[in-house]
Image (cartoon, rainbow, N blue to C red):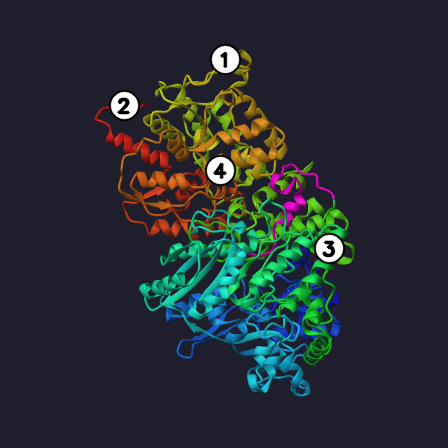
Amino acid sequence: MTDLEADLRKVVRGEVAFDVTSRALVTMDASNYRRVPLGVVAPRDADDVAAVLEVCRAHGVPVVPRGGGTSIAGQATGTGVVLDFTRHMNRLVSLDPEARTAVVQPGLVLDRLQEAAAPHGLRFGPDPSTHSRCTLGGMIGNNSCGSHSVAWGTTADSVSELDVVTARGERLRLGQGWAGAPAGLRELVDGELARLRTGFPELPRRISGYALDALLPEHRADVARAFCGSEGTLGVLTEAVVRLVEAPHATALAVLGYAGEGAAAEAAAGLLTHRPLTVEGMAADLVPSAASLPRGGAWLFVETGGATAAEARARAERIVRAADVLDALVVTDPAGQRALWRIREDASGTATRMPDGSEAWPGWEDCAVPPHRLGAYLRDFRELLGAHGLRGTPYGHFGDGCIHVRIDFDLLTEAGVGRFRRFSEELADLVAAHGGSLSGEHGDGQARAELLPRMYGAELVALFERAKTVWDPDDLLNPGMLVRPAPLDTNLRFSVLPRKPVDVAFGYPADGGDFSAAVRRCVGVAKCRTTSVTGPAVMCPSFRATGEEEHSTRGRARLLHEMLAGESGESGESGGPVTDGWRSTEVRDALDLCLSCKGCRTDCPVGVDMATYKAEFLHHHYAGRRRPASHHSMGRLPEWLRWVDRLRLAPLVNSLASVRPLAAVAKRLGGIAAERPIPRVAARTFSRWWDGRTARGTGDLVVLWPDTFTEHFSPAVGQAAVRVLEAAGLRVALPPTVHLEKAPVGDGRTVALDPVSLLRGRGRVCCGLTYVSTGQLDRARTVLRRTLDLMGPVLETSAPVVVLEPSCAAALRSDLLELLHDDPRAALLASRVLTFAEALERLAPGWRPRVLGRPVVGQTHCHQHAVLGDAPDRRLREAAGLTGELTGGCCGLAGNFGFEKGHFEVSRSCAEEQLLPSVREAPEDAVLLADGFSCRTQLEQLAGLRGRHLAEVLADALQDALPEGTDPGR
């Protein structure tokens, strides 16, 4: 233990963490920069903050306050001690509806304040796109804005009083009339009144530099306002009094379509006279699908408010009439508005990828110019991009003249970094020429502070330095930011990564086969840190269960980044915390609670796929080493179950599992959670049922995939699917069970034909899921190659492959392709895979299920949401008269995860988030749908309820519709 750590532990009541994981988690924010801290402290209160500052001052160690870590200019990183306010100092202290004020601690997430204010008809005005995870302290530090700033201004406009602790331990309460000003600040301002009155450009989004002009007499000498946007360099915020605004009773969203971004930018300023709540702009290349948007190549999102929905709509329609648009859409439905706003909010992540999939980076994320100059500025900006051979996609707060953009800088090579610097210098001059601010929302940090003299001039920047000295004479707080800055091309987070592709098992086709590029996908916008989800979203269930950064997708990506930095041997003086590469226990432990739900694959704006990264890591971590027992008991589950079937051991296994002492021993040996009952194995597998029936159907051929779970645990699901598919006029066959060079399929039966195969037992196709999820990738590849061999005759036909288990279908569509990316048969099989609902919709479009007229409850399988999509399932349920929506999130069992020792509580917590409450609140006649075996098992074990696959529900409806005594097919 270092002296610094020991001294902090003596005086701090909160957590003091100098371990590898804690340091690795905060090396980066959402910027291009990386700095490795000595340690992290989570203070409990202002006394802890003061104690940390005193100890660090004595040791000469800098201190960096940090909120949600979503800053885009590097100001939330540091080399000393990082203060994490999200753990303890995260409360809403009080809310006064009459005064329209709230008292908040710096670690309070914005959405929590909004939720508390909403019942009173109030809200906090500024609302960045990261509202579900950014903190009030971070917003004050950056003077954040958001889409509603045209109506309610910046965070500085919403701040009344601030409690801060200075670097030398002085506690100040900042406000108007010089309230709380440190000694010497007033004298500094009084001596520079002329410069302060003339040196700042007039525009709504001027965030760059210190807001010293707020200290002018005509601005009421507002010390609290001047403190906003200081990026933790002047003092440490411990509490704030913020002003709230009245929320409109109803809103309408007008989406205005224009030919291109230039036309949208030219039009934005003219709409401000109508007093809209938002004027946001974005172009087509940031929109995955423009199907829900009006005709055009760029759009303005203009929100209006009113006392009633009719009044809000009337105002929106008035704006549409006044605007010169190609097309327009007005939406008053709240759900429809949320869906449209999600397109805009996800742009901060979507923009990190160019249309061709190449990477784009922040650094010039939020320049702002006077709104009436925005069109001219964008034309000049585009020309500058072209001159440097760069690409970027502007979007943002057009009504305030603030533009966000990610640019395809090459930050990996010396030449590319040189171009980054030259472009930055020229763009700073361009912004200044248009009367703008280098930062219009996200602050200067390290990204832009070096260029402030180009905007303000050397003399005003020197005044900033003098102000910093007044507040922080020892330069203790966040040094290198805003004043005396580090060069903008140093501390780049990419510089420590390997220069050559890492030898990996998966193909990573979207990242050029480069695992480092896959890890680089995480840019830190931290959508995975949301504490609640709505609608179908899944990511990130383990973070919501634990609240710990290391169990978020971002946290795990950060640890993998630091692991690669240590592996590359290029950390230099950074002293990267993770030094043992793939053998890292810290990375292993962080990944341990990853459910491999794949939610991040879809819900993360940049498509981080942590389930794949986890499998990759486990593959390397355990290479040549002893694996956990659960990897053998559950990872090789298909093998054990086939032996149980071959030897007819199901009754014996079930009997032994019902004897508690024997089951306890088996679970202990197998690494299975003691709290979990062992699921019963079916006495007759699905394939044995199939062998004993008469083939039916004369229509198009479909091959039904006998996945491990349907085969051995839920054969009734397979039987039900066969009945429905045949009722829809389709002819069903199972995959071959022996490798035949030329064998027809389509007779509806599959039989082992040669003596060798009879001696060995029949082979079975397998998606390899259990091997992948436990990181046994060599074995997974062997299994998948054997599967492709078996499927050879099928692949020579045009027959689709219907997979009932969503996780198996997802594995065949994604994992198969990435593990066997060099085998063309893999892509062929993946292209044939259909879900049950997809098969009925595509192959039997004229068939209609019996209308049941009942509500449904349950949860969309997380792999279905992330990889497969559920639109066909929704349409099939609608056709069957099954009403209502399934919940999002994850059931928490997630294959082997919930069965592994030590995971039970997290597994149950995930189920309690959405699935179990929805089941408890469901009507008595509701149909409980759960297409995944894991989901059904979780419902049975935690709620005592039997969930059903949609195929079972539709098959039962067929049975009910048959004349009495009719055999539906055994």
Question: Quadrant location of the N terminus?
Answer: bottom right
Q: Which is in the foreground here, disc 3 or disc 2?
A: 3
Mark 2 Cα-neighbour bin, 10 Å: few <14, some 14–19, many ≥20: few
Kind of element beneath mark 4:
helix
Kind of element beneath mark 1:
loop
Foreground residue, 21 or 963?
A: 963
Q: Determine whether 550 is above or below 637 in the image.
A: below
Question: Quadrant location of the C terminus?
Answer: top left
List the residue tagged with mark 2.
Answer: 967
| Residue 565 highlighted magenta (yes or no) | no
Q: Of marks 2 and 1, which one's residue comes earlier in the chain?
A: 1
**Are dots 3 and 2 in contact, CB under 8 Å?**
no
Q: Residue 581 in the image: state x and y as whole percent.
A: 71, 46
List the residue tagged with mark 3.
Answer: 419
Magenta segment, which residues? 500-527
Kind of element beneath mark 2:
loop
Q: Residue 268 in the image: state x and y as whole percent.
A: 49, 64
Q: Amino acid at mark 2?
A: Asp
Q: Amino acid at mark 4?
A: Ser
| Residue 505 highlighted magenta (yes or no) | yes
Q: Amino acid at mark 1?
A: Leu
**Are dots 1 and 4 in contact, CB under 8 Å?**
no
List the residue tagged with mark 1.
Answer: 753
Q: Of marks 4 and 3, which one's residue comes earlier in the chain?
A: 3
List the residue tagged with mark 4.
Answer: 807
The residue shown at (48%, 41%) is: 863
